[in-house]
Amino acid sequence: MRKWFVVLLFLAVAGYGLWNAMAAGNEQETDEIESGPGIGQTAPDLTLPTLGGKAVRLSDLRGKAVVLNFWTSWCPPCKKEMPELAKFYERHGREVALLAVHLTTQDTLDNAERFAKANRLMFPVGLDVRGEALRQYRIQTIPTTYIIDPNGVIRRKIVGPVTAKRLEQETALFR
C-alpha cells in the first residue's frame, strides 16, 4: 500500500513539474500559430463595454501603440500574467494603451469583476459579452496578446503569458 502511495505521489509531482515547465515556455509567435488576424494586417475594430461602465473602441486608441490581451479569470496562465500587465501599465500606461479583453462568453461577468477587484486592475477591462472579439480574433488559446502599432497595424501576436519586460521590448519602437 505504501509503495503505491509513493508511486502516485511521484507521478503527481512529476506531472505538476511538467505542467509548470510547459506553461513557462508557452509563448509562441504568430508564425507557429496561424489563426486570427496576422502580422501586418489592420487590427479588426472592437467596441466593448468595460468593467467601469463605459465603452471602449479599439480604433479610438490609434495614435498610441496598443497591447490587446485576451483572458479569463479561470485560466492559470492568465492569472499569472495579470500582475505583469499591471506592472507594464503602471510604467507605460501614458504612452501605450492596454486593453484586457475578458472573454465573458467563456467565463462570467461576476468572475471578471471579482478578479479585477481582488487584483486591483487599473487598466481598462473590455467585456466580450457576445463573443464578437473571440470570433473576430479567432482566439483559440488564452492568454493571447496582440501588439498593435499607433496606426492600428498588428506587429506581434503572442500566445501564452507575457511579462512586463517582454511587453516593454515589444513596444519600445512605439514609445
Image (cartoon, rainbow, N blue to C red):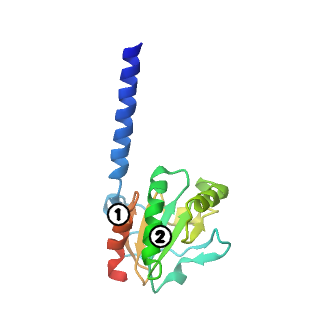
| SS at badge 1 | helix
Q: Nearer the viewer, residue 133 or 175?
A: 175
Q: Secondary structure at mark 2?
A: strand
From this viewpoint, which residue is outermost toward the bottom?
63
CA gap, disc 1 and disc 2: 15 Å
Give the image location of residue 7, x and y in percent: 36, 22
Estimate how packed mark 1 is, as few (under 14), some (14 to 19) or many (20 or more) residues with alpha carbons within 10 Å. some
Between residue 16 and residue 140, name the one nearer to us. Answer: 16
Q: Is residue 136 above or below residue 110?
A: below
* Residue 164 visible: yes
In-image side of 138 versus 106 (left or right): left
- Badge 1 or badge 2: first in the primary sequence: 1
Question: Mark 2 highlights which residue?
Answer: 68
Mark 2 surroundings within 10 Å by alpha-carbon count, few (fewer than 14), some (14 through 19), many (20 or more): many
- Report the front residue among 153 and 149: 149
**Residue at the spot of label 1:** 30
Residue 38 in the image: above or below residue 6: below
Q: Quadrant of residue 167?
A: bottom left
Residue 108 spot, x, y in % from top left: 64, 55
Where, quadrant-wise, is the N terminus in this rendering?
top left
Amino acid on which the number 1 mark rests in the picture: Thr
Looking at numbered disc 2 in the image, what kind of residue is underneath it? Leu
Q: Position of residue 73 (x, y in %)?
A: 56, 54
Label 1 vs label 2, nearer the camera: 2
Point 40% across, 57% down: residue: 160
Horizontally, is 138 left or right of 149 in the view? right
| Left or right of 168 in this view: 62 | right
In the image, residue 159 lies at what x, y percent?
39, 59
